[in-house]
Image (cartoon, rainbow, N blue to C red):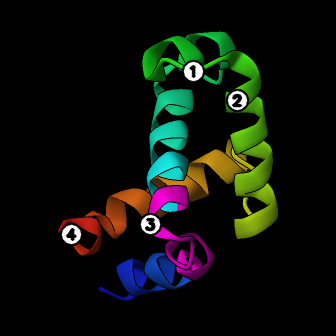
Amino acid sequence: AATKAMIASKGSNLRALSGEDLTAAVETIRAFSTADLNVARAAEQIHVHPNTVRYRLQQIAAKTGYDPRTFAGLVDLICILETTADEQQP
């Protein structure tokens, strides 16, 4: 419970994103992770241009403080998403 609470607290900047920005961020983080950090494959998965994925990754890093382009940043973001998944459900 303590670990879950700590991880959830790290996600405050991510959860602070507007609805549309949060949706795009979650979609991009998950696609980038599933694509093994390959921008082109992530773009294919979510049907956007690779530059859109690059821009979104840059914005996620700037707005959350966690850079998904790094292993540590991506792991933190995935943990935040998995830990707070119940909170994100409508």
- Based on the displayed image, in which of its 4 quarters is residue 11 positioned? bottom right
User: What is the CA distance from the residue labelled 1 to the residue labelled 2?
Assistant: 6 Å
Residue 68, compared with residue 90, is above or below; it is: above
Q: Are marks 1 and 2 in contact (CB under 8 Å)?
A: yes
Residue 32 belongs to the span the image colors magenta: no
Which residues lie in the magenta part?
Answer: 10-21
Q: Residue 33's spot in the image, x, y percent?
A: 52, 31
Q: Earlier along the polypeptide chain: callout 3 or callout 1?
A: 3
Q: Residue 19's spot in the image, x, y percent?
A: 44, 66
**Would you name the residue on which mark 3 appears?**
19
User: What is the CA distance from the residue labelled 2 to the residue labelled 3?
Assistant: 18 Å
**Kind of element beneath mark 1:** loop
Q: Earlier along the polypeptide chain: callout 2 or callout 3?
A: 3
**Would you name the residue on which mark 1 appears?**
48
* For discs 1 and 4, the disc positioned in front in the rendered view: 1
Quadrant in which the N terminus appears: bottom left
- Based on the displayed image, in which of its 4 quarters is residue 55 positioned? top right
Q: Residue 72's spot in the image, x, y percent?
A: 70, 50
Magenta region's main secondary structure?
helix
Q: Amino acid at mark 1?
A: Val
Q: Amino acid at mark 3?
A: Gly
**Would you name the residue on which mark 4 appears?**
86
Q: Amino acid at mark 2?
A: Thr
Which residue is at a point 51% across and 11% down the rendered structure image?
A: 44
Residue 6, compared with residue 55, is above or below; it is: below
User: What is the CA distance from the residue labelled 3 to the residue labelled 1?
Assistant: 19 Å
**Would you name the residue on which mark 2 appears?**
52
- State left or right for residue 35 relative to residue 62: left
